Image: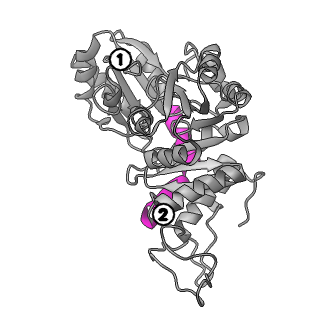
Amino acid sequence: MATNESTGFNTRAIHAGQAFEPRTGAVVPPVHFSSTYAQDGIGGLRAGYEYGRGTNPTRDSLQEQLAALEGGTHAFSFSSGLAAEDSLIRALTRPGDHIVLGNDAYGGTYRLIARVLGDWGIGNTPVDMADLDAVRAAVAAHPTKLVWVETPSNPLMKISDIAAIAGIAHEAGALLVVDNTFASPYLQQPLALGADIVVHSTTKYIGGHSDVVGGAVVVADEDLAEKIGFVQFAVGAVSGPMDAFLTTRGLKTLGVRMDRHSTNAQAVAEWLLGRPEVERVLYPGLPDHPGHELARRQMKSFGGMVSVQFRGGEAVARKVAESTRVFTLAESLGGIESLMNYPSEMTHASVKGTELAVPVNLLRLSVGIEDAEDLIADLERAFSAL
């Protein structure tokens, strides 16, 4: 089935890049495990396929699917979210360049930029992305090549104005990168709002089932695509065929899953808001969230991630994290099952002692698609043990 921008999101998710197999009519395209391809004479490639690091039909199908859903022209699939970010940054920056990023960025992203690429000569400035004057000043202070935004952010759930920051970046000759992992392409379309590049950990909502690790970069510019595609091929941190297949399978149900994630997260956030043990609930779907109105404008709904801070501090947060039965204590997020994470010692341990450090009384909840009543009952049981 042919798809285009006028086709609905869920139709594109199911059909983009997913033509039936012509020989047998199989409606699910086969997984191509071959590492190399027969040539019709030297240089006579069949449909451009030569070697598995460079091209693979299963990975190509996923990349077409991802580009269609983000409104891009080119997508690139990698072996992890950080591999995608690393390849992107090395494709577009050189020693002496600078990255301005959010002061609540994912710990792995900050570690990559500050500790790995910093030794290569890439500078960075963390800044509060909600403060547009601060963003403008940070971009002007250095030869900034990339402005890096997570919205919603991980794990403080800050909302950044993509269109406004795109304007600031472009005025300074910089590119805007948006990490769209928390929102997913179903809830938010950064390219349509002015971003130049979208990155994902496809491990999360796009894969959706906690059974595959991957990453992606999506662009709508031919020059950017050429540079990123070259590094993808030359460095080779590509997704394997089975990983690409599992990601494609998960992506087909992204829309219906995100609707349920969002509904459940709203119910959990509202329940948490009324609890005496809770100091603060961080969820953009709550009217008192500072980014609520902005999120309403640039997102379809508010997503499945909720962070919560406790009045009793670190001890209470740890106790709750270790007392749930339906919520599983684990890293990662975005799967159909509910997960709970203590970022200070888990996903964000790499930023302890920096200005990106996460409060020690904070838990991050990845609200799954179970029955909301069971999730709330699980939390109530854990709270009762305090």
Label 2, on which residue? 245
Q: Residues within 10 Å of mark 2 (few under 14, many from 20)?
A: many
Disc 1 secondary structure class: loop
Q: Nearer the viewer, residue 312 or 97?
A: 97
Q: Quadrant of the N terminus?
A: bottom right
**Horizontally, is 386 left or right of 201 in the view?**
left
Percent x, y of residue 233: 52, 62
Q: Nearer the viewer, residue 177 or 201?
A: 177
In the displayed orientation, state which residue is furthest to the right: 6
Q: In the rendered image, which residue does mark 1 sit on?
A: 359
Q: Position of residue 69 (x, y in %)?
A: 64, 50
Residue type for callout 1? Pro
Give x and y (percent) for residue 343: 34, 28
Q: Residues within 10 Å of mark 1 (few under 14, many from 20)?
A: some
Residue ID at (50%, 49%): 87
Magenta range is 241-263
